[in-house]
Amino acid sequence: MKTWHIAMLVMLLSLSTGVPATAISVEPSAGLAFAEMARAATNCAPLPPPPVGDTIVSVSTEAELWNAVNTAQPHTTILLADGTYNLGANGHYVWIDTPYVTLRSAGGGREAVILDDNYSGTEIVTIAASNVTIAGITIKRAGTHPIHVVSTETADTLNTLIYNVHIVDPGQQAIKVNPAVAGHYPDNGVIACSTIELTDAGRPHVSDCYTGGIDMHQARDWVVRDNLIEGFWCSVGLSEHAIHFWRGCRDPIVERNVLRNNARGVGFGMATDGTARTYADNPCPAASGYIDHYGGTIRNNFIFANRAELFASADGYDNGISLWNACEVKTYHNSVISTQAPFSSIEWRYPNTTVHLVNNLVSHNLRERDGATAVQAGNLTNAPLTLFVNGSGGDLHLLPTATAAIGQGAALTAGLCDDDIDGDPRPIGPARDIGADEYGIPAPAAVRDLRVTQATLAGSDLTITLRWTPPATALTTTVRYAAQPITAENWDAAPDFAMGGVLDTATNTIPYSSGTRYFAVKTHNEGGWSALSNLAFWPHYDVYLPLVLRR
């Protein structure tokens, strides 16, 4: 059974350290945007240090912060000392219109640095330049948008990174992204490893239910991943989605998010007319007229509702995923679960809507509306809460008894959805599981640094020492050798060199007359065997230069 439960995910998202640093591990150069590293990350590693060559400006007051932003040159990192910065109440407003500027906490702890507007102004942080990063801070009680990303009249705004940020109680949408004028757009951004919430204390400050988590207009190629978003609903009125792309957005990836108790979860598209971005390459040639959203992928999300007040509100719990006037959307391996019935768990609407719905696990219904088209495979509807570790509380990892979902998923082409919400590979076992969680323990990763560190030849006896880095989840180790290259096909026929538990080195003496000896490693755990390691071999002088002795 998985050890990563919802409580653990929430805890990890609230921290800036303590997660393996494999996702974002390179030292960035002055010309490399943090967003480019974060885009392909698979977990929530701490953000790397400021790029080499950046000007570092440390601030501890509202006036110092305001001045640092207004005078920043490209490649500046502004480090905020711990404390609360009351911006609007002191006449300050953070408008970043210089490229390659980073605003982050000095100590890395996002709960220790708070930008608090107390609803006294409008926005708190506006990003109007490319390659801007906001990381490791809390932003709360904005009059309108805590973070607003806009293009300008003369340029696109590219490569925004919003990372490990905690946004609390926005007056309107928490993160708003839209162009300032037609022709220049806010593209290629990343929102990751953040918590965005509307609390009971903040809900009365929202006017006419004009609120939502992330709201994108006319934006292309964004990644929204590994976030916790919760509480976006109103007593009266229907809020926008926790994550919403519309007005001509294109090709976002929305993955591995936990969405809890929002009136609507993920939305691609909504309107049937109006002003939207269009594309010269005509990405949806079969559609006609107004199109509100193009392409994109929604995968591996936990979408959950259990709050009585949400169900009892005027508009109730509407849906987990809605695809309206949206063409060629891929919706794979999501778990959409609620303790009371929504209008729809997943719905698709209007004739221009064409979607692929594969291996989604929902507690209630899939709903087609108003002439939309869907290609469906491997979905499970009306799933009982007993399939999950805590179905009534929101831990949507599968139990070992969830046989209706385990191993029942449809096959998918490689590259479409190769892992699950925890980053575990798919499938674990012969076939995919349905939903965002892939049940079981994955086999260990393959060893990739096997090498010969010493060799001693005495007559016909060759004594070899091998070293490698054991995979984190390995429980046993097998090392084999042969006089020909070892492959997956001939592994079983190769003689054993060493066997044991979690090993990182092995020494043995084997017979040798001439030629080359090849060595390979496999490790094993409850999930099965790893793939074959890289090959080490002897003689081998060019890479590791082992000590070779002949007696």
Image (spheres, rainbow, N blue to C red):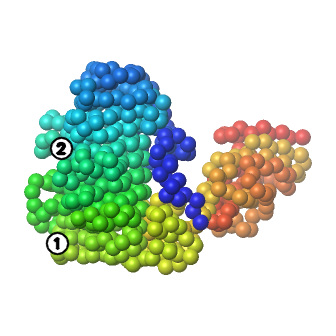
Dot 2: element:
loop
Q: Which residue is mark 2?
A: 179
Horizontal and vertical percent position of residue 503: 75, 51
Which amino acid type is marked by label 2? Pro
Q: Residue at x 41, y 28 (%)?
A: 83
Image coords of residue 412 (percent x, y):
42, 70
Q: Which residue is mark 1?
A: 351
Q: Describe residue 81's horizontal placement relative to residue 243 as left or right.
A: right
Task: Decide if residue 139 is in sight here.
Answer: yes
Name the image quarter holding residue 133.
top left
Residue type at the position of mark 1? Pro
The location of residue 315, given as percent across then percent down, is 23, 65
Is tag 2's residue or tag 1's residue first in the polypeptide sequence? Answer: 2
Residue 322, compared with residue 170, is above or below; it is below
Q: Would residue 210 appear left or right of 485 to someone viewing this image?
A: left
Residue closest to the eye, 374 or 3: 3
Q: Choose between 390 and 499: the one closer to the eye.
A: 390
Quadrant containing the C terminus is top right
275 lies left or right of 113: left
Residue at position x 50%, y 48% from top? 12
Determine which quarter of the picture holds residue 313: bottom left
Q: Position of residue 187 (x, y in %)?
A: 26, 45
